[in-house]
Image: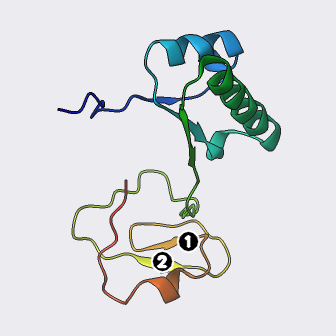
Amino acid sequence: MSQRKKTKIVATLGPASDSIEVLEQMILNGVDVFRINFSHADYGDVEKRVKNIRDLNKKLNTHTSILGDLQGPKLRVGIVAEGTRVAPGDVITFSTEAPFEGNKEKVYMNYKNFPRDVKKGEQIISR
C-alpha cells in the first residue's frame, strides 16, 4: 500500500506569512502548496515569495509547490440609485455605453464585450 498522502494542505500567502521563518515553519508543519493571489500582490512581492519558497525547498529537501491564482475578468456594474432592489426573476438591461446611474431596469456594465459574450434573455448569476 502506498505511503503517499492523498490530501494536500494549501496555504494562501499574505502579510502574516512574509518572513522566511514563517514559511519554513509552515513547510515543516505539512504545507504542500503555497497559493499566491495575484489580485493582491505586485511583481516584487511575488518574486520574493517564489524565491523564498524555492530556497527553502533546497534547504529542507522538500518539494512544496507554488500555485499562482490569476485574476479573471472583473465585470462590474456602475453606480445604482440608492434603495434599488432587484428580485429573482427581474429583467435587467445592461448597457456598455457611457456610465450612468442605474436602477432596477437598466444598469451600466464596465465590460465592453459583455453584449458579445451573452445572449439576449440569458440568465446572469451574480455573487
Q: Amino acid at mark 1?
A: Met
Per the image, the residue denoted by label 1 is: 109
Q: What is the x, y in percent for residue 73?
A: 57, 64
Bin the neighbour count of mark 2 within 10 Å (Cα to Cα): few under 14, some 14-19, many 20 and up: some
Q: Amino acid at mark 2?
A: Phe
Circles 2 and 1, Cβ within 8 Å, touching? The answer is yes
**Relative to 45, is 121 on the left or the right?**
left
Out of 26 and 5, give the one closest to the viewer: 5
Q: Which residue of the protein is positioned furthest toward the right in this rendering?
A: 44
Q: Position of residue 63 (x, y in %)?
A: 54, 32
C-alpha span from label 2 to label 1: 6 Å
In the rendered image, the residue lying farthest to the left is 1
In the figure, 57 relative to 6: above or below?
above
Q: Which residue is mark 2?
A: 94
Name the quadrant of the N terminus. top left
Element on which disc 2 rests: strand
Horizontal arrangement in the rendering, residue 90 relative to residue 1 (left or right): right
Q: Residue at x 77, y 41 (%)?
A: 42
Pointer 2 or 1: first along the chain: 2
Query: Can you tell which mark lies on residue 14?
Result: none
